[in-house]
Image (cartoon, rainbow, N blue to C red):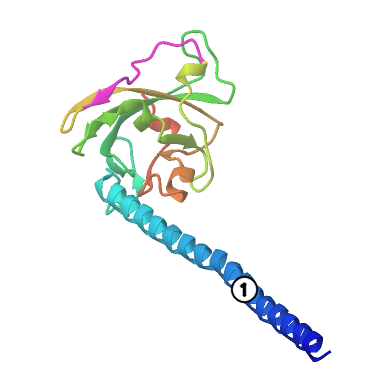
């Protein structure tokens, strides 16, 4: 009887020891994924830092002109030159004269009047200037602070001396920009305010004129 009791005691003790070892093994296996997750987080952090460094290098090597150092020019008249600075370009535009017409080449404006601006561009940056992009920078309006209307030559069957291609650094070129506007006592050709608000253009430039200024 004592042998049987001893046998049962040894069996129970062995089962207890094995159970305890099995519990520890389970705990160890539960901890391993946590360690792996920590390693993954560290690796992800290193990747993120590497990406940030690459982005910084790209920014430093990009042609972006930064915050810009060109002041607003808000009181220009016909014949004056304005300097415009964008994120990637810097150029001058002189409005040499304007023509206000109710009809051009048999076409009439959807709004009140055509405004044909005779202008000169000068590239004062060290990269080529996209002339169409420069033209699209501007709009005309009858209110100094309000939004206006961009160039419209592509919407009418009219012949003008339009700008095309690129302008090399230091070069100048003359041509025409066709606008249409509401009737009004005073008109303003200026940089599109949305471009200034988004910092695509760093400064505002505005020319004002009346019908008396028209050739």
Which SS class for mark 1?
Answer: helix
Instruction: Please give the range of residues in magenta.
Output: 156-167
Give the quarter of the image for residue 42.
bottom left
Question: In the shown orientation, is residue 170 left or right of residue 96?
Answer: left
Q: Is residue 9 magenta?
A: no
Report whether residue 115 is seen.
yes
| Residue farthest along the left direction in this orientation | 170
Find disc 1 in the rendering and name its residue: 27
Residue 184 coordinates in the image, percent (x, y): 54, 35
- Relative to 15, residue 178 above or below: above
Give the quarter of the image for residue 19.
bottom right
Q: Residue at x 23, y 27 (%)?
A: 167
- Relative to 211, residue 107 above or below: above
Residue 58 coordinates in the image, percent (x, y): 30, 47
- For the residue carrying disc 1, how many other residues have a C-alpha within 10 Å: few (<14), some (14-19), or many (20+)? few
Q: Would you say the magenta stretch is mainly helix, strand or loop?
A: loop
Question: In the shown orientation, is residue 214 left or right of residue 183?
Answer: left
Residue 68 coordinates in the image, percent (x, y): 30, 52
Residue 151 versus residue 181: which sits nearer the camera? 151
């Amino acid at each position: 009887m004592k042998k049987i009791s001893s046998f049962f005691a040894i069996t129970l003790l062995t089962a207890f020891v094995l159970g305890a070892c099995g519990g520890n093994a389970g705990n160890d296996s539960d901890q391993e994924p946590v360690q792996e997750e920590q390693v993954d987080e560290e690796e992800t952090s290193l990747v993120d830092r590497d990406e940030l460094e690459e982005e910084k290098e790209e920014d430093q090597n990009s042609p972006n002109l930064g915050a810009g150092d060109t002041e607003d020019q808000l009181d220009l008249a016909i014949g004056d030159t304005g300097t415009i600075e964008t994120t990637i370009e810097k150029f001058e535009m002189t409005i040499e004269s304007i023509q206000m017409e109710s009809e051009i080449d048999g076409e009439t404006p959807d709004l009140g009047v055509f405004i044909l601006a005779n202008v000169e561009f000068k590239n004062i940056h060290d990269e080529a200037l996209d002339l169409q992009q420069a033209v699209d920078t501007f709009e005309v309006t009858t209110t100094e602070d309000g939004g206006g209307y961009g160039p419209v030559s592509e919407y009418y069957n009219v012949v003008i001396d339009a700008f095309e291609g690129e302008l090399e650094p230091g070069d100048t070129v003359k041509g025409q920009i066709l606008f249409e506007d509401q009737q009004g006592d005073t008109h303003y050709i200026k940089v599109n305010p949305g471009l200034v608000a988004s910092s695509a253009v760093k400064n505002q430039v505005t020319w004002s004129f009346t019908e008396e200024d028209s050739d």
